[in-house]
Amino acid sequence: MERFNERGMLIIPNPVRERTAADKILVVCSLFCPDGHNLISSRAVFNGYPGILVKASKGSKQGLIALSPVYGSTARISLDIDLVVGEIMDLHCPVCDILLPVHSPCSCGADLVAFFPTKKSDFTDCIAICNRVGCINSHILINDEVISLSMVDAF
Ligand SMILES: [Zn+2]
Ligand SMILES: [Zn+2]
């Protein structure tokens, strides 16, 4: 069975059988900053999968946030920063501190920040996550095709 696609994502059967909207879940296995640093870290593990580690800053406070790599899951852990729902955070690479680029505006008025599944930093093939704490707007763009939350409805 082909478990990895060429973009470093892991496709596994959805164990939640009764939710027939999706029979698979998508797990992000590699994600890079524009400089090619891997943002996947085993410092925070979600459902057995290493999380996405980013540095968040707002004014004088900053810290690390781990996001669930399972598509559709809004689980996140803040490691040393207090997150206030509704606040807009700047998201940086934890290695080189580069500000992660904006993909497009989110419908909530904040920005969808781009994360790249390959080191090519290709905006047509990226994962966009809203930088407003508590906004569930995140989606995965694969070949410009948006997979909606309802199509990949995990957990
Ligand atoms: Zn970096
Ligand atoms: Zn948003």
Image (tube, rainbow, N blue to C red):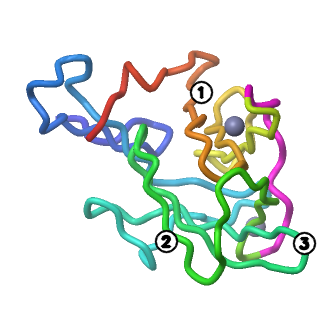
Q: Earlier in the sequence, mark 3 or mark 1?
A: 3
Kindly identify which residue carries mark 2: 41
Extreme residue toward the right, this view: 59
Residue 82: which numbered mark, if any? none
Task: Return the residue nearer the eye: 14 or 58.
Answer: 58
Which quadrant: the N terminus?
Answer: top left
Write the residue at 85% across / 65% down: 98
* Residue 112 in the image: above or below residue 147: below
Spatial CA distance of label 2 from label 3 is 25 Å
**On screen, residue 26 above or below 62:** above
Q: Residue at x 71, y 60 (%)?
A: 36
Q: Nearer the viewer, mark 3 or mark 1?
A: 3
Q: Main secondary structure of the magenta part?
A: loop
Q: Residue furthest bottom?
A: 80
User: Is the CB–ligand 1 distance for label 2 below 8 Å?
Assistant: no
Amino acid type, mark 1? Leu
Q: Is residue 102 part of the magenta span, yes or no?
A: yes
Residue 10 horizontal side relative to residue 53, left or right: left
Q: Position of residue 55 (x, y in %)?
A: 71, 71
Residue 127's quadrant in the figure? top right
- Secondary structure type for disc 1: strand
The nearer-to-camera label among 2 and 3 is 3
- Quadrant including the C terminus: top left
> In the rendered image, which residue does mark 3 sit on?
59
Q: Amino acid at mark 2?
A: Ser
Label 3 close to label 1 by CB (< 8 Å): no
Q: Could you tell me which secondary element the residue under label 2 belongs to?
A: strand
Q: Which mark is residue 141?
A: 1
Residue type (three-letter) at the residue carrying disc 3 = Gly
Which portion, as a residue range, is magenta?
A: 96-107
Residue 59's quadrant in the figure? bottom right
